[in-house]
Image (tube, grey):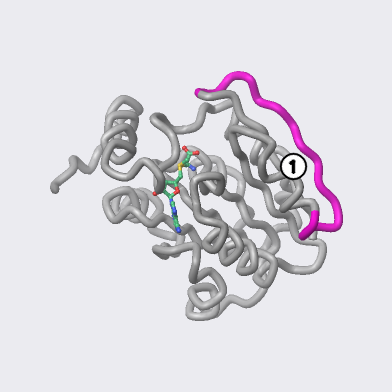
Amino acid sequence: MQYPAASSLMYEKILFLYKFIQSPKQVGSITPSSKYLAQAMLAPVNWSLIRTIVELGAGTGVFTKGIYQNVPRGCKVAIFEKDNDMRKILTAKYPTFRFCKDAQNLSREIGALGLSKVDCIISGLPFKLFSQDSRDRILDEVEHTLQEDGLFITFQYSLQMKKQLQSRFRNMDICFVPFNIPPAFVYICRK
Ligand SMILES: C[S@@+](CC[C@H](N)C(=O)[O-])C[C@H]1O[C@@H](n2cnc3c(N)ncnc32)[C@H](O)[C@@H]1O
């Protein structure tokens, strides 16, 4: 399927909905996250200290845009998005970022890019809709890839991930973002 190069907000919403209809368990939401959720996801990051950052499940790039606007010069950025069409659009929009497909292969892909441990991982993955096996596998990869003291920030539409994340991270804070469809919880986890 061919998509236009220019991506307006409306076009991104339509693409997102179309992809949700095709693969609801992979996409996990009918519409991209709001700017309020993007702000809450990126607010805990101390950008001056970030040398390597990874985003998992970028979709149409709401968080990717924030990352692009904030990363310090020389910072290495790797973006994971499983959907080929969404990934293609983001690759054209952010040519200086590295792009990978599947978050399940996080450490291998990061190694192939010549990176080792990363300072921060921002995730839009719909963990609740994954099998326990693939949830565990991705969280193992996240734990393995993150620096000591690194930040893992994810959002979910429920508190279902609280115990699982608490058991893996030294510290966790949760904040609620009402202005999103649906309202969301942001989990801020410190390794
Ligand atoms: C809920 S959407 C979030 C998109 C975007 N971050 C946002 O907040 O609008 C989840 C995204 O994760 C992607 N995804 C699901 N499983 C994935 C995987 N194993 N690896 C990489 N991306 C994945 C989906 O294709 C979808 O674009």
Residue at point 82% right, 62% down? 149
Q: Which residue is mark 1?
A: 44
Residue 156 drawn above or below residue 153: above
Spot occupied by residue 131 in the image (x, y as percentages of width and height): 51, 55
Residue at point 73% right, 44% down? 162
Spot occupied by residue 93 in the image (x, y as percentages of width and height): 35, 48
Q: Amino acid at mark 1?
A: Pro
Asked whether, in this view, residue 26 is left or right of residue 159, the answer is: left
* Residue 173 makes an appearance in the image: yes
Spot occupied by residue 2 in the image (x, y as percentages of width and height): 14, 46
Residue at point 81% right, 47% down? 172
Residue at point 71% right, 42% down? 187
Give the secondary structure at mark 1. loop
Work out which quarter of the rendered image holds the C terminus and state it: bottom right
- Toward the top, the furthest residue is 179
Spot occupied by residue 46 in the image (x, y as percentages of width and height): 75, 48
Q: Which residues are magenta?
A: 167-181
- Front one among 116 and 15: 15
* Residue 74 makes an appearance in the image: no
Asked whether, in this view, residue 154 is left or right of residue 93, the answer is: right
Residue 141 drawn above or below residue 181: below
Determine the image quadrant of residue 76. Answer: bottom right
